[in-house]
Amino acid sequence: MGTGNHFMPTQEKTGVRPTESGVRPLETDYEFSESRLEATGFIFHGNVPSPSEKKSAVKANSNLLHFARCPKLEKVSDQQTKIWFRSIKLAVSHLNELLGGQRWKWCKLCEREVTQRILDEI
């Protein structure tokens, strides 16, 4: 077999329910690369504490939400939890529920792109 990431996040770890469409944990390197190749949706990566764990400080370059095509995703660690979202609305509501609103943020590159799109439409 390949040398892919065999870490399998559990439903408890990712907060993703099996029936929830538009939200998918990326459990292998193959799923992660395919989601990036499709270039649709949004990908979160970070450290998601289990409900019984105490929430620790968020480290730089973790708990970030990106556009699926963001080049910064190439540097993501294999040990981090990765979740794909179909829409921004799903991502924001899921991450706020799972981590809390102050425990994740947009990738700065992606945030600039969104801001520029909004300004271009004005």
Image (cartoon, rainbow, N blue to C red):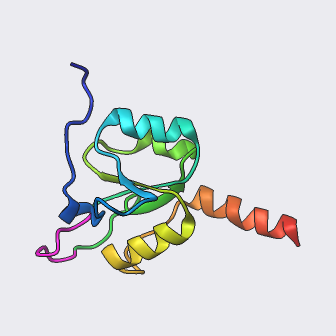
* Residue 99 appears in the figure: no
- Whether 50 is drawn above or below 109: the answer is below
Task: Report the residue at 58% width, 48% height from top.
Answer: 40
Q: Give the range drawn in magenta.
A: 48-55
Question: In the image, what residue occupies the spot 25% across and 21% down?
Answer: 2
Task: Indicate yes or no whether the magenta region holds residue 49.
Answer: yes
Residue extending furthest front? 19
Q: Residue 28: x and y, percent?
A: 30, 38
Q: Position of residue 43 (x, y in %)?
A: 46, 53
- 78 left or right of 10 in image: right
| Residue placed furthest toward the top | 1
120 and 25: which is toward the camera: 25
Spot occupied by residue 68 in the image (x, y as percentages of width and height): 54, 48
- Left or right of 18, for residue 22: right
Residue 42, position in %: x, y? 52, 55
Picture quarter containing residue 12? bottom left
Residue with the most extreme right position: 122
Q: Main secondary structure of the magenta part?
A: loop
Task: State the quadrant of the C terminus.
Answer: bottom right
Residue 102 sits above or below residue 106 on the image: below
